[in-house]
Amino acid sequence: MQLSPVVLEGTVVRMEPLTLAHVPALSEVGLDPSLWALTSNRVASEKDMREYVEQALIEQKAGTALPFATVERASGRVIGSSRFGNYVEAHKRVEIGWTWIAPAWQRTAVNTEAKLLMLTHAFETLGCRRVELKTSSKNARSRAAMLRIGASEEGTLRQHMINPDGSSRDSVYFSILDGEWPRVKEKLNAMLRQTRAD
């Protein structure tokens, strides 16, 4: 199945297809240097954010990506972004990544529900057999989050990418397989129930 723009609606967040119209709202919440310190992107201005979105849309047009704006449902405010990328229909494989949430909404139910919505779409609509996630080997918080939701760490690709400052980045890969999805789905739902109870 081809990647097609879709709205993924949850209780806390709505994942809506990313457009250039989101650039001003993304720039309002997304220029904090801490968001980009351990990524292969540097977004420090609205111009940078526009280029970031334009690149995502180029990949969407090529059929390999589907980027989203992350919207807080209660306020209607854009608070981050995420995307499906590196989609290979023939092998039923996709990556979830390029995820950032503005600092004020970190460590809330936002990212957990966003992952649940995207994984549900990947496995139950796109029919994927494998969902990949990756992060910098230096990003301990992101690595812990991937393990917490039930992804399996597969290994480290050394000098996998080049950071904006020219240094090398080692990337740690994680995955969730279709046979593991029911367990992961229940774990994510339990995490969301716990968050609501708190």
Image (spheres, rainbow, N blue to C red):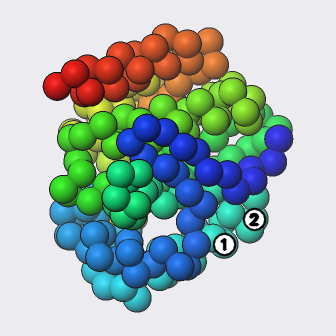
Residue 160 higher or lower than 89, as above or below: below
Furthest residue toward bottom: 47
Q: In this view, does 45 lie above or below 196?
A: below
Is disc 1 surrounded by few (<14), some (14 to 19) or many (20+) residues within 10 Å? few
Label 1 with label 2: CB-CB less than 8 Å: yes
From the image, tell me which residue sits under label 2.
62
Q: Who's the residue at 32% across and 48% down the image?
A: 136
- Label 1 is placed on what type of residue? Ile
Identity of the residue drawn at 26% across and 59% down: 102
Q: What element carries label 2?
A: loop
Regarding residue 152, the answer to whether it shows in the image is no
Q: Which of 173 and 160 is in front in this view?
A: 173
Give residue 126's position: percent from left, percent from top. Answer: 73, 36
Q: Is residue 70 above or below residue 110?
A: below
On-image quarter of the N terminus: top right
- Which residue lies under the disc numbered 1? 58
Residue sitting at x 20%, y 70%: 33
Residue 27 image offset from top left, x and y in percent: 34, 77
Left or right of 60 on screen, residue 98? left
| Residue 125 placement, left or right of 51 | right
Q: Name the quarter where the C terminus is drawn.
A: top left
The Cα atoms of the two marked residues, 1 and 2, are separated by 6 Å
The answer to which of 22 and 153 lies nearer the viewer is 22
Image quadrant in which you'd find residue 194? top left
Horizontal side of residue 119 vs 172, given as left or right: right
3 or 194, which lies in front? Answer: 194
Label 2 crowd bin: few (<14), some (14–19), many (20+), radius 10 Å: few
User: Residue at coordinates 24% horizontally, 40% vertically from top-left?
Assistant: 108
Amino acid type at image mark 2 = Ala
